Image (spheres, rainbow, N blue to C red):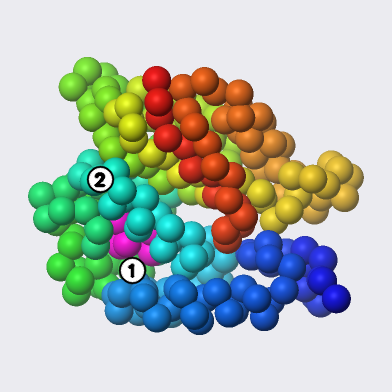
Amino acid sequence: MASDSKNSTGAFKKGLLQSEELYKYILETSVYPREPEPLKELRELTATHPRALMATAADAGQLMTMLLKLVNAKRTIELGVFTGYSLLLTALTIPDDGKIVAIDVNRESFEIGLPVIKKAGVEHKIDFRESEALPVLDQLLENKGNEGSFDFAFVDADKVNFSNYHGRLMKLLRVGGIVVYDNTLWAGSVVMSEESTPERKRPGRQAIVELNKLLAGDPRIEISHAPLGDGITICRRIL
């Protein structure tokens, strides 16, 4: 029998597949065997963190790696770093002279994964900025040379600003570039009523619902809303 979106303790699960066994099959058959050793090390390190659910899901990360390669990404932006799983996979994928502008308000979490990043030999590709994301995006846009110069962006920061990030990223991304938004199903709460959504998740739920409407109606992009991890939406800029 299919389970609901909560486990036996009432906590929301990160994955949305209705069978834990099926999700485990995907991970053990197709994801973990191909996961680079540095990513495995960082994933296992992050699993001990009290907020481990904030990390990018490994299956979503595998898809992101493919997307980075498909667009031959060299210049990327990451909003929300946490311990750096998605940052590390990006750094491992882009060329040696590539660059990632990585933005997070909490350097402490980033430094948990930094030894693994250094050991993997890709620290030189990362331009980490400890800051709120909007000021950094605005600073990038002040330099007109940055407009249309980025190939890829990954957004896993504060949900209430996702829609604000989108407008700025559409200017920074080149035509044909991709932005991936994480948590766009928000533990399934996007189809729940306000009253049935846990109070702590309500602000994020509303922001994600608004973002999903915005993305669905934006003529500048093609989208694919994929039920990986906590939901990701892949947007390819076409205008």
Q: Secondary structure at mark 2?
A: loop
Q: Nearer the viewer, residue 194 or 170?
A: 170
- Say which amino acid is labelled 1: Gly
Name the residue at 42% across, 35% down: 236
Q: Nearer the viewer, residue 151 or 109?
A: 151
Name the residue at 52% across, 36% down: 223
- In the rendered image, residue 152, in percent from the top left (x then y), is placed at 33, 41
Q: What is the total number of numbered labels drawn onto the structure image?
A: 2
Q: Which residue is mark 2?
A: 73
Residue 162 among magenta residues: no
Range drawn in magenta: 85-90
- Seen in the image, is 211 located left or right of residue 151? right
Where 72 falls versus 11 (above or below)? above
Q: Which residue is mark 1?
A: 113
Within 10 Å of disc 2 (Cα), the crowding (few <14, some 14-19, many 20+) is many
Classify the position of the C terminus by image quarter: top left
- In the rendered image, residue 190, in percent from the top left (x then y), is placed at 74, 44
Name the residue at 85% across, 76% down: 1
The reply to whether discs 1 and 2 touch (Cβ–Cβ < 8 Å) is no
Q: Nearer the viewer, residue 40 or 138?
A: 40
Residue 157 in sight: no
